[in-house]
Image (cartoon, grey):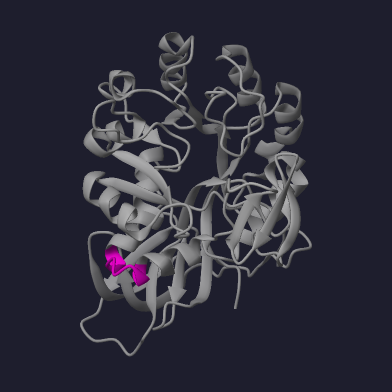
Amino acid sequence: MFRLYKQKTIFTEMTNSNKVSGKIINYNDSYSGEITFDENILNINKIEEINSKNYIIPGFVDLHCHGGGGFDTMDGVQAIQKMSSYHLFKGTTSLLATTWTSSFEHTYTALKDFNSLIDMNSNLIGVHLEGPFINPEKLGAQPALAIEPSIDFIEKINEIADIKTITLAPEIKGMEMFIPFLIDKNINVQFGHTLADSKTCKKYMNSNDVSFTHLYNAMSDNNHRNPGALSAALNNGKFAEVICDLNHVSEEAILIAKKCIPDLYAITDSIAASGMKDGSYKFANVEIEKKNNKVYLNGTNTLAGSVLNMHDTFLNLLKMKISIKDAVRMTSYSAAKFLKKEDIGVIDDGKKANFLILDHDFNIKSIYLNGKLING
């Protein structure tokens, strides 16, 4: 047996090869079949008729997740381990632990020893830095600790934690040198918490696969005379993340973005209050209130992240009449594509054995991470 920690994250030992069967759903195909696997998928045998009502889909990929189950990334590796476990049991088999804008010292302390958590028993695949290189006039729920770009900040953090993605504002001073530096370091760039105009965004989008952080939220809008970051995303974007709790973004706006952006992917932007009862909590060192699946900064109408998980997201997409294949694309494949992670986000020979077995009503029956059954 493998035991990670207290929060009931228990892995069952694999035999030399395991087998599961059902209707396999990828972003581009669906068929009945039997999967043979160890930590990777060894073979898929397509079957014309199968006595199973199960669906098998790729494990969810969440590239923007601050916390869950009462734990926050910025509280250090033990909290990161526990929040990632919470989301693993909701079907997220690949997760970027996401910071919020804070001092270098706080960020370094929170992420110290992070890389020790990345192993076969973990759904953690790296870090998403949301800030601190954002526009101080477009903070949203972020603390007022935004700074100008710092190569030294990135290099020191990258020594202790594998930075996969960073959210930044392209209009702030120093980005002309900073963004190429990040691209050279294989750090994926997302525009967010920004007041950039469309022209500034497109300057970088012309030569790089840029994404957009929580599309529609905390960014300059689609003004018909002064187009902003949202205009650039909808008109020229290949990738963007969007929160699908139907609080941050309406159903209609999500469907518009889906028409415009080929690889729109869903994220949770989940905070520690996810999975917790209604009440008062803290996020980014400020008081927040959770009520009826919404979280606001106390005394304001400002949303402070979400209390969503990726299974909720998947179900919301289906409720919006998005096809199951497109829901799979938005909850696994497109995010993996943005990260250039070809071994996740799809069920195929040689890929990681990260998949979910759902019943006919799309409830999670089983979760497999690197071939190990973690529930059931």
Q: Is residue 31 above or below residue 50?
A: above
Q: Residue at x 51, y 30 (%)?
A: 166
**Magenta highlight range:** 318-325
Which residue appears farthest toward the bottom when viewing the image? Answer: 51
State the image quarter where residue 231 is shown: top left
Question: Between residues 204 and 360, which one lies in front from this camera angle?
Answer: 204
Question: Between residues 321 and 76, which one lies in front from this camera angle?
Answer: 321
- Residue 343 in the image, given as x and y percentages of width and height: 40, 48
Give the side of residue 43 with respect to residue 15, left or right.
Answer: left
Q: Is residue 140 above or below residue 148?
A: below
Q: Residue at x 28, y 56 (%)?
A: 255
- Residue 332 in the image, given as x and y percentages of width and height: 40, 55
Total tally of numbered discs in the picture: 0
Q: Is residue 284 above or below residue 163?
A: below
Q: Quadrant of the N terminus?
A: bottom right
Q: Residue at x 37, y 76 (%)?
A: 55
Q: Is residue 328 above or below residue 75?
A: below
Give the side of residue 111 with respect to residue 181, left or right.
Answer: right
- Residue 30 in the image, given as x and y percentages of width and height: 25, 69
Instruction: Find out whether residue 173 is within the magenta segment.
Output: no
Give the side of residue 208 with respect to residue 168, left or right.
Answer: left
Q: Is residue 235 visible?
A: yes
Q: Residue at x 70, y 64 (%)?
A: 276
Question: Between residues 272 and 2, which one lies in front from this camera angle?
Answer: 272
Q: Quadrant of the C terminus?
A: bottom right
Q: Is residue 370 visible?
A: no
